[in-house]
């Protein structure tokens, strides 16, 4: 093997390349990585040594002897520890490496070996591992890098590996950031990016028409970049979303995780974070009873098998509790995985190797096997198998290109000291850009069928998505274990279809989870019992008014009734009927805006005209008594009933003017429209297994500048009340039986004033309390109207019964000798 180049010369060469590239870095993120590279190399220059604590593992063992093939090495950097343990994917790589070294058509005369170092899924550890391998004094020059485990540890190595003329292939990383060819120019990725998985999440959201989701994201670029793309899709589709970014403080503990993390009204949660984050979130979800069918969680697909069991007790949950909250949870897998392909399919990597045979040998022969003794295998193992073959095919093609193209061979030889013949691949050094560029072009042309499906790369070196698999965690009815089951597939056009044998009922046995937006709505009318009682009172009041009017008509020629102006009494009775009708209109059921709007307008017109007819007539009768007994002038003008009727009509015209003008301002709504508001009397409930809310609403009367209109309209009525109080007080000493209504009318005015005040307050304070408002408003109308009718008519009925001939009408006269005019 060639001697190791002078370290200081090499570092100076790399530093100059970094500085020359920096003007081409396009954004802050890229400059950050350039500076990271510069800092990392300068730190190595000062230390002039690799980290002494790192221990390498070589596989397969190098053969010795005269017939041994020449060993070639590549750097394998994976995570044996940290937030994501990627070595569970290495059984597939081991199998591929064994097949490659057994295949005489690949790398003839050579054997291929990896040198393994742990990156611990950490940026700093990954850089240390990379520099340790680059400056290894035993195995000096590796031909490329497969790694470096998770996306977090892969980013720094993929950003600097090309400066050492190394291509890098990853079978684990999936961050959308790797699509940047400027920042990662010689990087290839067997997995699609997590941005593709974000598209699959969106496909499921669209399929079920969920309109609100909650995004819980670990503060790592791998997850935030993917979720940012998902948010763009959600925004375009009008889906409401909230985002909670989680920060790891130490020992993988999330800072500030609590009920508030979930308490935003959402029911659908997408969790994007490494397994320790996923465990804590799901444990907290269990503690807050966020279980199916009321809640649904989407989790990351590439967690290792049984990820929820590892150390969950430190978060305060048991394995059984974690399985309970995970049951029916969904996860989405990129299709490049052997587990989800037809087991009878064959591959291009080894003659007659089927997917089923691969899976069998992987689990039987490559678990708990030296040198790494990996205890289990995960779904990405097949991707690492194909990644190993992609790297080897490119290396094999590069060797063939160098052997057949002497111009290329001579260019590669320019980087070799003491040239003794044609360039050979084992003479590669980190200055040799010709080998790297040839490897890069051969990787770009990759196209074969592997155990995880077809393998080829787009222009950014990322494997394209062919399909997504939707998995659901379910309890195995036989064993009681929680396992993932394929329930559907998502095509490249983001269409979801169920797997054969799966239906809506099998996936969601207790109903599709509710998204927190769609609600069952119910518009409530006045309670039936209250409607019945008040309608009965209204009808009784109308009948009572008709009886009073008949009494007035039948006895209109008697002395007593003639003194009370029977023609005006007809107006009082008519107004009372309108007020009683207003009671029925107020409580009549209305569950549509149109019906409620009609009733609102009827209510205000009936109440306004009824009050003016009923109370206004009493007012003018009181004014006539006041006029007669407080103006002792023999020449004063006689007041006839038709004059008083005109005064009442004036009150009606004022009402009509206000109502017509305000209706014109409102337009098609009329005086008042109907507005739907929350029913403050009925608590919203959750129905069914999914806990879908049922919200209750009522229609209330509303309008533009409603408060101003009601203030003017009822203020005018209150002014009439004040006038009535004054007239009742001024005529309190009148003693003529036919005219001494002052004490009754005064009582009526006092009562109706109180009722009017309460009614006005109810309009402003009980708008959303439909039953209470209807009860207060209508009972007030009933009491006030009934008192008026009783004092005007019942008192006369009682007097007429005791004195049918009217002999005692003038038994106690007032000091004035003037008698009122007859009607």
Image (cartoon, helix red, strand yellow):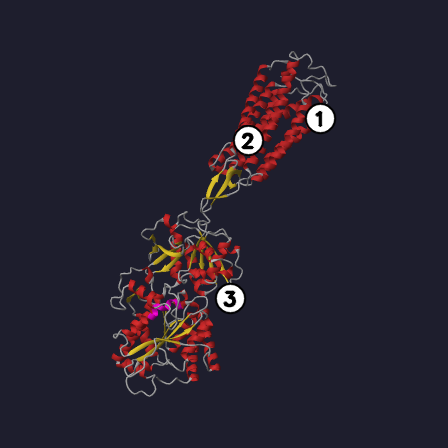
Q: Quadrant of residue 488?
A: bottom left
Name the spot of residue 768 as percent of width and height, x first. Answer: 55, 40
- List the residue tagged with mark 2: 656
Q: Secondary structure at mark 3?
A: loop
Mark 1: secondary structure: helix
Residue 460's image quarter?
bottom left
Mark 3 Cα within 10 Å, few/some/many (few <14, many 20+)? Answer: few
Residue range (magenta): 87-94
Where residue 440 appears, as percent x and y from the top left, is 33, 73
Residue 476: percent from left, percent from top: 38, 54
Our reading of the magenta stretch's main secondary structure is helix
**Earlier residue among tags 2 and 1:** 2
Q: CA distance from mark 3 to mark 1?
A: 89 Å
Q: Which residue is labeled 1 in the image?
A: 730
According to the picture, the residue beneath numbered tag 3 turns out to be 251
Mark 3 or 1: the one toward you: 3
The relative height of residue 390 versus residue 741 in the rendered view (above or below) is: below
């Amino acid at each position: 093997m060639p001697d190791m180049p002078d370290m200081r010369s090499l570092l100076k060469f790399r530093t100059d390349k970094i500085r020359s590239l920096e003007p081409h870095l396009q954004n802050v993120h890229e400059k950050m990585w350039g500076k990271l590279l510069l800092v990392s190399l300068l730190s190595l220059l000062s230390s002039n040594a690799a980290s002494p604590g790192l221990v390498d593992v070589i596989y397969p063992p190098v053969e010795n002897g005269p017939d041994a093939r020449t060993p070639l090495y590549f750097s394998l950097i994976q995570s044996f520890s940290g937030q994501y343990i990627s070595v569970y994917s290495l059984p597939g790589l081991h199998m591929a490496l064994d097949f490659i070294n057994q295949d005489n058509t690949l790398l003839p005369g050579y054997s291929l070996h990896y040198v393994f170092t742990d990156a611990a899924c950490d940026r700093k550890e990954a850089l240390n591992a990379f520099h340790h391998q680059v400056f290894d004094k035993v195995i000096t020059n590796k031909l490329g890098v497969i790694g470096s485990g998770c996306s977090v540890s892969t980013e720094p190595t993929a950003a600097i590996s090309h400066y050492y003329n190394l291509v890098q292939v990853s079978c684990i990383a999936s961050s959308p950031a790797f699509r940047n060819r400027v920042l990662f120019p010689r990087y290839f990725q067997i997995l699609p990016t997590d941005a593709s998985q974000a598209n699959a999440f969106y496909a499921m959201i669209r399929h079920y028409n969920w309109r609100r989701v909650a995004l819980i994201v670990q503060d790592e670029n791998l997850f935030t970049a993917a979720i940012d793309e998902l948010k763009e899709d959600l925004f375009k589709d009008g889906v409401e979303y909230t985002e909670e970014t989680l920060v790891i403080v130490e020992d993988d503990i999330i800072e500030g995780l609590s009920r508030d993390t979930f308490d935003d009204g959402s029911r659908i949660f997408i969790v994007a974070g490494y397994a320790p984050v996923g465990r804590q979130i799901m444990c907290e979800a269990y503690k807050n009873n966020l279980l199916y069918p009321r809640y649904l969680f989407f989790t990351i697909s590439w967690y290792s098998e049984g990820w929820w069991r590892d150390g969950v007790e430190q978060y305060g949950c048991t394995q059984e509790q974690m399985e309970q909250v995970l049951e029916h949870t969904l996860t989405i897998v990129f299709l490049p995985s052997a587990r989800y392909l037809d087991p009878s399919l064959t591959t291009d990597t080894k003659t007659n190797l089927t997917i089923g045979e691969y899976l069998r040998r992987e689990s039987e022969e490559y678990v708990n096997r030296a040198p790494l003794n990996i205890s289990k295998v995960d779904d990405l193992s097949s991707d690492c198998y194909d990644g190993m073959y992609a790297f080897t095919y490119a290396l094999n093609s590069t060797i063939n290109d160098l052997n057949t193209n002497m111009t290329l061979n001579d260019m590669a030889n320019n980087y070799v000291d003491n040239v003794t013949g044609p360039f050979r691949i084992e003479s590669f050094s980190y200055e040799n850009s010709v080998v790297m560029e040839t490897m890069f072009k051969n990787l770009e042309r990759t196209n074969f069928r592997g155990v995880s499906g077809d393998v080829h790369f787009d222009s950014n070196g990322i494997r394209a998505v062919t399909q997504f698999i939707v998995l659901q965690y379910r309890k195995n009815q036989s064993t009681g274990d929680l396992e993932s089951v394929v329930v559907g597939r998502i095509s490249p056009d983001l269409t979801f279809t169920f797997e054969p044998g799966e239906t809506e009922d099998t996936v969601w046995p207790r109903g599709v989870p509710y998204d927190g937006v769609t609600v069952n709505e119910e518009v409530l009318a006045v309670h039936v019992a209250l409607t019945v009682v008040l309608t009965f009172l209204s009808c009784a009041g109308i009948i009572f008014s008709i009886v009073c009017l008949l009494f007035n008509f039948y006895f209109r020629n008697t002395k007593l009734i003639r003194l009370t102006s029977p023609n005006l009494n007809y107006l009082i009775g008519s107004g009372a009927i309108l007020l009683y009708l207003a009671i029925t209109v107020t409580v009549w059921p209305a569950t549509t805006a149109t019906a409620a709007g009609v009733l609102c307008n009827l209510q205000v017109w009936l109440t306004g005209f009824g009050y003016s007819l009923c109370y206004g007539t009493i007012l003018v009768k009181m004014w006539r008594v006041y006029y007669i007994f407080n103006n002792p002038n023999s020449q004063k003008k006689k007041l006839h009933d038709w004059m008083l009727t005109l005064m009442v009509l004036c009150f009606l015209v004022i009402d009509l003017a206000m109502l017509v003008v305000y209706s014109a301002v409102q337009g098609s709504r009329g005086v008042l429209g109907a507005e739907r508001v929350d029913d403050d009397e009925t608590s919203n409930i959750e129905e069914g297994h999914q806990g879908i809310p049922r919200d209750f609403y009522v229609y209330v009367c509303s309008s533009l500048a409603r408060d101003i209109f009601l203030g003017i309209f009822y203020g005018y009525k209150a002014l009439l009340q004040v006038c009535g109080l004054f007239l009742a007080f001024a005529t309190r000493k009148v003693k003529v039986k036919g005219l001494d209504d002052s004490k009754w009318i005064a009582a009526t005015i006092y009562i109706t004033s109180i009722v009017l005040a309460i009614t006005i307050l109810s309009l402003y304070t009980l708008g959303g309390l439909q039953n209470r408002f209807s009860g207060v408003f209508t009972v007030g109308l009933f009491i006030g109207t009934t008192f008026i009718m009783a004092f005007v008519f019942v008192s006369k009925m009682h007097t007429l019964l005791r004195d049918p001939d009217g002999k005692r009408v003038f038994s106690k006269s007032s000091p004035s000798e003037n008698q009122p005019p007859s009607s």
